Structure formats: structure tokens, C-alpha cells
Image (spheres, coloured by chain):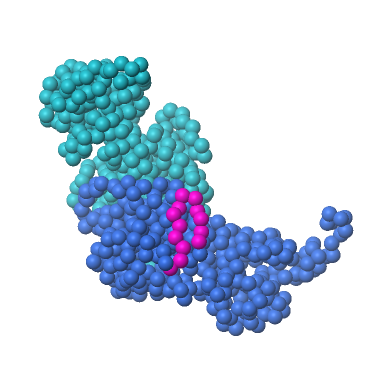
Chain colours: A cyan, B blue
Amino acid sequence: MDRAGRAPPVHAARGLYVLTGQAPEVLLHVGSPARGARWQELLPTLVSGLIVRQWPDVGDPAAIRYVAAWAPPAGLLASLPHLEVVFSVGAGVDHLDLSDVPAHVPVVRMIEPGLVRGMEEYAVFAVLALHRGMLGHIAQQRQGAWGDADPVTATPARRIGIFGLGAIGGAVAARLASFDFAVAGWSRSPRSIDGVETFAGDATLAAFLARTDILVNVLPLTDATRGIIGAATLARLPRGAGLVNIGRGGHVDEAALLLALDSGHVGGAILDVTSREPLPAGHPFWQHPRVLLTPHIAGTTDVSGGAAAIAEQILRHRRGDALTGVVDRQAGY
Amino acid sequence: MDRAGRAPPVHAARGLYVLTGQAPEVLLHVGSPARGARWQELLPTLVSGLIVRQWPDVGDPAAIRYVAAWAPPAGLLASLPHLEVVFSVGAGVDHLDLSDVPAHVPVVRMIEPGLVRGMEEYAVFAVLALHRGMLGHIAQQRQGAWGDADPVTATPARRIGIFGLGAIGGAVAARLASFDFAVAGWSRSPRSIDGVETFAGDATLAAFLARTDILVNVLPLTDATRGIIGAATLARLPRGAGLVNIGRGGHVDEAALLLALDSGHVGGAILDVTSREPLPAGHPFWQHPRVLLTPHIAGTTDVSGGAAAIAEQILRHRRGDALTGVVDRQAGY
């Protein structure tokens, strides 16, 4: 019963009694069957009257209000007449063809605490590794050589630069600032974060790079950012700078990075993403002593955190509240 | 002039005019000549009337009030009739023969922000590396293999155990707790740290180990702790547990650790210290895929931070205030 004491109408939807005035709605999940199975259990407990279907079991296309996907098959979205929201199951939407999404349907990025925490953890791991010369220690261990305890650069003298200051970049910047690093961040539009120097727009890029000893990339991949970490950008970093890429492989001109690593202009790179994944056999990054490679593990959407994030958005949508994390079609993120 | 308007007596000490009522005092530094030279500049600016000599240039033994050393030569301390305080230049005093220090002379450990911060940084790096499976990724990279993005253990479900809760252990525990890990600490005597579950004394050791997925050792090396990380301790950790050693090599029974690594009972070890340093050529740790070795770099005393810490203690001593970080001769730390 609701607060006014009225018994709500009861709908029987595929064996589920739905205690709301709402007609049952279907969310179609396109992705890992393991996650799909968990979301089929979890989401209906969070959103009354929601039924989760797992692609390719579409059922009645007219019943589908929501799609949650990384890369929906071409034409799918346009075939759903009552589609109301598309959810990306990752923080990025670069694998999703935005031109395939009907113009009136918002696309929502995945921002959930597990994913943000994963990116924060990886960024802190990688920045500390470069700060403390760990790639050199790993290479020395392989050679059976006990290195010198080089003088440590004091933390406040180490200048970290975060490329991208959205939900993830902001969290990474704040976390690194709590270690007393000198943290700055660059983004297209102006941002403000406690304890972090912020730069905005192309005109400030050179100044941002010139003061950055360790560059951490968390930019979204768009037409404007593809290849942004190329020869010109790397040349503007101080000699010996480090690079951490937890954005996308497409941000980096890998040939330019190799040249910079081999010349020593870039002292080390920790790369969670590459232009092709898996990285092809024989690629020079595999055995490069100044490169640490991981297989795209920095931020993965937590199954229950992801369900909670989608549930919250659907409830906002039902109440008529504004969705959060809606992708700007023009900007591409 | 002092507050009462009296002009203080002026002493001429080796060309330095000392504007205090204090007779000039000598601190003898036994250690790296580079640090000694910097302390000869720095300390007199922080402590009026202090003269720094660099071993073996002892000068008049009767003028020496303070010795700052890692391992003073046998017999030196007993030969200084007016010795008042011995300062360790490191956080540990295990290299210092306490039986060689006259009974009335306090021995003070080095606790300075740069050293504590270095230990914190290393501990966070190493815990995140083990938490996120980085030793496996490093080994896979070497083999040219792109691994799977294994499901990440949620941070709050990862149980970190800090072995030793002094100034360093306490800072490490608090820092890791800020990442939302489940952090506990073990020490001989009871401690209390916000957000950290604390265990004290031998009777609680088994319970502490049983709930610890990643053990971080920052214990002092004493007769009571030598070899404490042996077969029995390792067996009490859950299968697949990780070990971070930033204490001393002497804490670990390296043969027992190797067996545990090879059986998979210990999933990975990050070792900054070993029983012999440099680690001898051919030791199995060098090429072990589950071991990351670094050459005793975790915490190094910052030259200016160390000078400031010693200066503060000398000023406390002159005022008659209690010194901080005084070593308990009985406990050995």
C-alpha cells in the first residue's frame, strides 16, 4: 500500500507480480553472459517492474525501453520503437556508434564506484612505480643486478599531470594530491578541484605539459583526442618524464612513443591500453625495458555496482529527474 | 639580546661567533661523506653553537656531545667522555651495537617525514601491485602473453595486515585504510589507530595472520623478531597471500618463503630487503616470477628532513624536554 493507503494496481508480468502502477519495462543487455545473468537477478530487485533480457533474446522489440551495452550490433537500436535510454557498460562510449542511436535517446556513461576506484588504484600504483623508479628495478632484477638506492625526488617536487578531469580524472587527481604530489589537470572545459592546479583548453596545453613529470591519461577517446599523445605532446614534456595510459590506446601515437622511449626523452611508460588489444606478437612494447604493459585491467565495471548505477538512473528517469553522465553527442563523451 | 635585555656572552668557536650562553657543542657524524657535508652546513643554521665533524676527523673527544651514525665503529662511543645522545641515521637501530653505548646515553631513532613518506609510498605501491595481480602481468609481459582481465577483488574485501605499528607502521596502516582496504595491524604492545583493527602480543598472532591477505612487514629487527616470518607464520596466512617486506631481511626465513612461493601458498612477494644485501648472484629470488626485488630503497632518510629531526631533538635536549623516539634497550627498538 502506498502512503495514502491505496492498494497499488497489480500487474502480472511473466510470472512476476509487479506492485506498481507502472507497466513492466524491459532492459536488453548486450554483453558478457555472466554479467547478464547477474543483472537478470539484481536489477529487478532494485527497479520494480523491470525485466532484463540478454541479447540475442530480444523478445518483443516494442517492450524494450533500455539497452545496456558496450557495442550494440548495428541497426539494433533503431529497431526498438520505444527505446528510452542507452546505457554504456563502460566509462567510455568510443565503442558505441553514436550515429546509430536515435537522436531523442540519451546515452549514459557508466560511472560506478568500483570502476572509479579501480582506475584510482591503477593510477596510484603506476604513478608511484614511475616516481620510485620501479621499471628500472624490474629490469635490474631480470639482469640479476642490485641497483643503487638513488636519491628519491621528494613527493611535493614531483609534478603529476592528469589528462582529463571528468569523474575518473577528478578522483585520480584528488587521490594523488593526498600524497602531496604537485598535481595539475587538463581538460577541455574549466574544472576546479581542491589542491589541484587546473588548465583548460588547447591554449594551455603546452604550459600543462611543460610542468608535468608524470602524465596520466584518462581522456575520453573522441575525434578531438585521437592521437593526442604524439610526437609534439611528448616533446613538450620534460626530459625523462613518465607516461601512464589508462584512457584508450587510440590516444597514443605508438611509433612516436617508442622513439621517445628509445631516446630517453620519455623515461618510462605504463600502458593498460594499446591501439590493438591484444597487442600483436613481436610489438616492441612487449620486451621494452621502459614499458610495463597490462591487459586493459585498470577499471572494470563491478557487476553489482554497475547494476546499482543503472537502477538509480532508471529510477531518476521514471521520476522525470535529469539523468547524470549523459553523453554530449557533439563532443562524443 | 635576550628578552630580559641582557647581551648574551659571545664565544668564538673555530671562526664561528656563537650568540648564546651555550658552550660550543660538537656532533660527530659517522656515515656518507655527502650527507656529512650537507649536515655540516645545515645543522649549525638550525642549532646555534653546534659544530658538525665528520668521522674519522674526531678532533677533541671531550667536545663531542652527539653522535649521528648507522653503525659507529666498535669502541668509539665509549671513548667520548661527554657523549650525551646517540642518533641513528635510519629508522632502525639493528646495525648499532647497543651494548657499545654507555648506559646513561639515550639512543634516538630517526623518524623524519621524508623517511616515513618513502615507506608509505613503497607500501602503497606494493600492496596495490599485489592487490591488482601485477606480478602476474609482469611475468606475462615477459612471455609476450596478453592475460585476462580477471575479476578484481573489491578493495574492502582485501585484508591487509601491517606487522609493526610504530611511527612507520601506523602511517602505512592509516594510508592504506584511506583506500578502503580492510586494514589490521599487529604489534607487541596495544595501539589504537582510526579505521584499523589492532592486535597486540603473541597470543593474537595466529588470528591476525589468518585474516591477512597481504602482509606488510615494518617490524624492527630484534632478537624477538628475527626470523618471525618463517614456515609457521607463512602457513597461517590464507592460501595465495602476498608478502611485502620493508622491514629487514633478517625477519624472513628465505628458504621457507621460497617453499611457500613455489607451492603457491604465498602468491607473491615484494621484497625491498634481503638477508644478505646485495642478494648473492644465483639466489632463486632473482628470477622468481612471483618475486619483485628492489635494492633497499623503500625509506631513505632525507638529508634536510634528517637534519631538522636531529636539530629538534638537540633543542629539546638543551631545554631539558624529553627526547622522542628513544630506543628501549631491553626491547631493542
- Image point 61% across, 61% down: which residue? B309
Q: Main secondary structure of the magenta part?
A: loop
Q: Which residues are magenta?
A: B190-202
Indicate left or right for B314 with B227 as reference: right
Indicate left or right for B136 with A263 as reference: left
Q: Is residue B194 magenta?
A: yes
- Image point 41% across, 41% down: which residue? A172
The N terminus of chain A lies in quadrant? top left
- Image point 21% across, 54% down: which residue? B144
Percent coordinates x, y for residue B5 in the rendering: 87, 55
Q: From this viewpoint, is residue B130 visible?
A: yes
Percent coordinates x, y for residue B230 in the rendering: 35, 71
Q: How many marks?
A: 0
Q: Nearer the viewer, residue A318 or A176?
A: A318
Residue A2: image quadrant is top left
Q: From this viewpoint, is residue A203 visible?
A: no
Percent coordinates x, y for residue B79 in the rendering: 65, 82
- Image point 35% across, 58% down: which residue? B211
Q: Nearer the viewer, residue B50 or A208?
A: B50
Name above or below for residue A124 compared with residue B295.
above
